[in-house]
């Protein structure tokens, strides 16, 4: 399916990857004067049906508002007005509330279909964007002043010439690998089991983060009194959780989390995915920029991944449009390094925090257990620290893109 018939084979910017981050970036270039191609391998019906849900930070919601899609998204998401942190069965917990950061809510939970449907609807109105879908990049060559991509579309190979290529093609990014951009990171000893539950007791617009010795587990509120659970465990334990029938899984859930949620029902399938930390040593090369998971992957703790990618998209769009107004070469390393300096350090901070929290709270060494419980006491009782921590994790302390300020 194509939202627009390709009118030309020459573009200013070609985006490879039409997920939430890639489509956000394309929409952020609306009315920019750039000729944009968006290449996506997955047909629209598959993309919309993907059973994922995301924690959407306040900054991400402001970016969507700046794009003009938040009014379509907002009625279909759930807000969370409380976040509770707990260290396994330790009775003292930390609770974040909107007054900690001076807002009406702490964040939102949105299902993938809600985000991608709204973004694709906006994409329909972007007269400067051509969508190639389903299509796959089979070869990329970089020259002195442009790049040439060979794209498989409708069984035929078509050439696209582009001044700049933007990789939004996931954590295993072929474009990043072809460019020889090195990464650092590691696979965690954990895996996540993800499920959607229909709750018996009301979720009270509360998000939970429980830290167990097997890893952190998050519970996110969804509309219609449902929730999304991200259950982190060792890989062997995660495989056992996935293999359980629904009744066994619910019993394991109740045993772990008590009777607080009543007896929930499972909606849909459960999924297992491995966890890794990955960070690209470079976000840019001449004529190439990485955004989203192509540049970084983090532990799902706190739901940071999608929000980092949305900020990448808004930041790169701003850098490129500013460069265009100045008459600069948007594909030059000089211009693209501005994006890298903006986003690489901010993302590294989030990656480091999530990694440190996971390692600290998964550790059973007695002095570390005592230290983290003192840290929870500190968070619970010292309001400025509690406020700062949540603002960092919500993206409210770094440089905000102009889209979020409209």
Image (cartoon, rainbow, N blue to C red):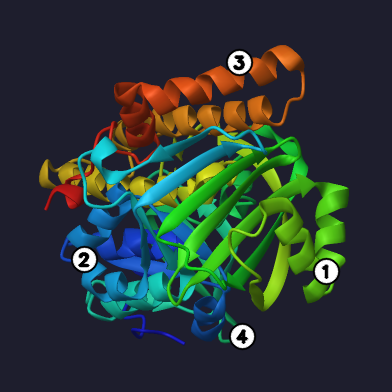
Residue positioned 70% across, 76% down in the render: 269
In the rendered structure, which disc, 3 or 4, sits on the residue that comes first in sequence? 4
Inter-mark Cα distance, 1 to 2: 49 Å
Residue denoted by label 2: 30
Q: Nearer the viewer, residue 307 or 342?
A: 307
Query: What residue is shown with label 3?
Result: 371
Label 1 packing within 10 angstroms: few (<14), some (14-19), many (20+): few
Q: Image quadrant of residue 356?
A: top right
- Where residue 159 appears, as percent x and y from the top left, is 48, 70
Q: Give the Cα distance between marks 3 and 4.
A: 59 Å
In this image, 386 relative to 194: left or right? left
* Structural crowding at the residue carrying mark 2, measured as other residues with C-alpha within 10 Å and reported as few (<14), some (14–19) or many (≥20): many
Q: Secondary structure at mark 2?
A: loop
Residue position marked by numbered label 1 in the rendering:
248
Residue under the image location 83 percent in, 69 percent down: 248
Q: Which residue is mark 4?
A: 155
- Image: 242 above or below 277: below
């Amino acid at each position: 399916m194509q939202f627009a018939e390709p009118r030309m084979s020459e573009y200013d910017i070609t985006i490879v990857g039409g997920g939430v981050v890639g489509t956000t970036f394309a929409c952020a270039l609306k009315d920019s004067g750039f000729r944009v191609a968006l290449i996506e391998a997955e047909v629209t019906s598959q993309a919309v049906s993907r059973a994922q849900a995301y924690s959407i930070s306040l900054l991400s919601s402001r970016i969507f508002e700046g794009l003009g899609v938040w009014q379509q998204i907002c009625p279909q998401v759930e807000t969370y007005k409380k976040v509770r942190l707990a260290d396994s069965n330790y009775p003292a917990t930390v609770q974040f509330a909107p007054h900690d950061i001076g807002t009406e809510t702490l964040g939102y939970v949105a299902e993938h279909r809600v985000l991608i449907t709204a973004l694709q609807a906006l994409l329909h109105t972007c007269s400067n964007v051509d969508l190639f879908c389903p299509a796959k990049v089979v070869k990329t060559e970089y020259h002195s002043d442009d790049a040439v991509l060979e794209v498989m579309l409708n069984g035929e190979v078509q050439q696209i010439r582009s001044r700049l290529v933007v990789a939004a093609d996931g954590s295993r990014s072929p474009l990043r690998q072809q460019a020889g951009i090195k990464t650092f990171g590691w696979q965690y000893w954990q895996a996540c089991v993800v499920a959607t539950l229909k709750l018996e007791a009301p979720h009270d617009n509360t998000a939970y983060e429980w830290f167990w010795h097997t890893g952190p587990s998050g519970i996110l509120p969804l509309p219609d009194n449902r929730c999304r659970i991200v259950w982190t465990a060792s890989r062997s334990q995660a495989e056992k959780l996935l293999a359980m029938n629904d009744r066994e899984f619910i019993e394991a859930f109740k045993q772990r989390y008590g009777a607080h949620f009543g007896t929930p029902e499972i909606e849909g399938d459960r999924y297992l995915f491995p966890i890794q930390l990955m960070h690209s040593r470079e976000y840019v090369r001449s004529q190439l920029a990485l955004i989203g998971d192509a540049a970084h992957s983090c532990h799902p703790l706190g739901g940071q991944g999608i929000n980092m990618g949305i900020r990448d998209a808004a930041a790169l769009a701003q850098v490129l449009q500013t460069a265009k107004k100045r008459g600069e070469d948007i594909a030059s390393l000089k211009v693209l390094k501005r994006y890298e300096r903006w986003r690489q350090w901010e993302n590294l901070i989030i990656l480091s925090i999530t990694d440190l929290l996971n390692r600290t709270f998964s550790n059973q060494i007695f002095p570390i257990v005592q230290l983290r419980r003192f840290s929870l006491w500190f968070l619970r009782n010292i309001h400025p620290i509690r406020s700062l921590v949540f603002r960092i994790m919500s993206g409210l302390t770094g440089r905000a893109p102009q889209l979020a300020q409209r």
